[in-house]
């Protein structure tokens, strides 16, 4: 990360070395930030800086196969699975002397955050899911997703990161990003081209939506407040969040205007206000004078 006050380091966690970025005071309430597929902790730079300025400690993680966290060479593919990654993340909190954190996840990172919150609720103060799904309920559809993820993984391995960057960026789900400034779009493409093909392929095979367990029937097991954030231009995930929100014991679904799938990139001010309102409301800090609902 290039933002002032954010440090980058690596941590050994259960036999893997994780890339981690830290911002804010060590004793402040912790916010764990989990990126989406083909991303890294760098994607949270602006959010992490804002959180630190607001009195929180931001912890942005490179998930396995992404950024500075390599694919687990010599380990079975199962080492990438959601359950294993959740254990790695709780180990990271232990390593940082953090008893509980506010977990924030975007897309793939949101699925991991949800799975972790269900498996280890004692480590989660609040949960924020940005454009995240609980997995796929239908067994036939899930099997088809496994097949399509395997085809994409094989293509990434054979064609390389440059092909992937162009192909991934052209997906309809990212259509709204075409209106972003050219410099921002170029930076997104550059980051995708830096991805490790083997790492992306392993991630797809082990923690893609087809491979992960369906969590939709278990969200009520998480006993603390949840915030679901979706972009108004991302109709699929707006519907998924609207369906999932009532299943939580306590959840608020916020739809951000003018944003697609990646809300914190496309509408950073709205996302930041929504997140800080949620944290202040449920994290023991002074509430904002007005809610951050668009």
Image (tube, rainbow, N blue to C red):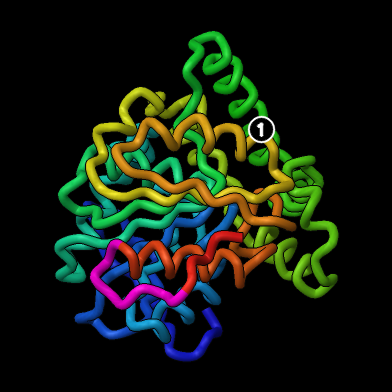
Circle 1 Cα neighbour tier, 10 Å, few/some/many (<14 / 14–19 / ≥20): some
What x and y, as percent, mark residue 225? 31, 50
Q: How many marks?
A: 1
Closest to the observer, 128 or 89: 128
Give the residue displayed 52% in from the left and 78% down from the top.
Answer: 1
Closest to the observer, 131 or 68: 131
What x and y, as percent, mark residue 274? 50, 64
In-image side of 270 versus 108 (left or right): right
Up/down of 138 relative to 252, above or below: above
What residue did someone put label 1 on? 152
What x and y, as percent, mark residue 234? 69, 43
SS for callout 1: helix
Prevalent SS, magenta region: loop
Give the residue displayed 52% in from the left and 66% down from the top.
Answer: 292
Give the residue displayed 84% in from the left and 57% down from the top.
Answer: 178
Up/down of 70 relative to 287, above or below: above
Which residue is most to the bottom?
A: 4
Residue 91 occupies quadrant: bottom left
Up/down of 176 relative to 136, above or below: below
**The magenta stretch spans residue 120:** no
* Highlighted magenta segment, given as a residue range: 282-289
What x and y, as percent, mark residue 50? 48, 80
């Amino acid at each position: 990360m290039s933002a002032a006050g954010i440090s980058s380091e690596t941590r050994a966690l259960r036999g893997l070395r994780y890339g981690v970025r830290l911002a804010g005071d060590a004793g402040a309430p912790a916010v764990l930030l989990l990126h989406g597929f083909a991303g890294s902790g760098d994607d949270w730079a602006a959010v992490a800086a804002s959180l630190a300025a607001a009195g929180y400690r931001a912890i942005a993680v490179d998930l396995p196969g992404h950024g500075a966290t390599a694919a687990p060479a010599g380990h079975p593919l199962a080492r990438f699975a959601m359950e294993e990654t959740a254990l790695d993340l709780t180990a990271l909190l232990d390593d940082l002397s953090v008893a509980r954190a506010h977990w924030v996840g975007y897309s793939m990172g949101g699925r991991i955050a949800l799975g972790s919150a269900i498996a280890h609720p004692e480590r989660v103060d609040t949960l924020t899911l940005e454009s995240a799904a609980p997995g796929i309920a239908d067994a036939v559809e899930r099997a088809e997703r496994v097949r399509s993820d395997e085809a994409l993984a094989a293509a990434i391995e054979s064609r390389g990161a440059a092909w992937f960057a162009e192909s991934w960026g052209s997906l309809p789900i990212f259509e709204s990003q075409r209106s972003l400034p050219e410099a921002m779009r170029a930076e997104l493409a550059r980051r995708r081209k830096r991805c490790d093909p083997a790492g992306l392929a392993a991630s797809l095979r082990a923690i893609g939506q087809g491979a992960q367990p369906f969590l939709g029937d278990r969200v009520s097991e998480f006993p603390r407040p949840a915030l679901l954030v979706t972009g108004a231009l991302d109709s699929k995930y707006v519907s998924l969040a609207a369906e999932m929100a009532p299943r939580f014991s306590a959840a608020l679904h916020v739809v951000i205007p003018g944003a697609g799938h990646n809300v914190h990139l496309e509408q950073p001010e709205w996302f930041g206000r929504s997140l800080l309102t949620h944290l202040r409301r449920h994290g023991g800090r002074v509430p904002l004078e007005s809610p951050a609902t668009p």
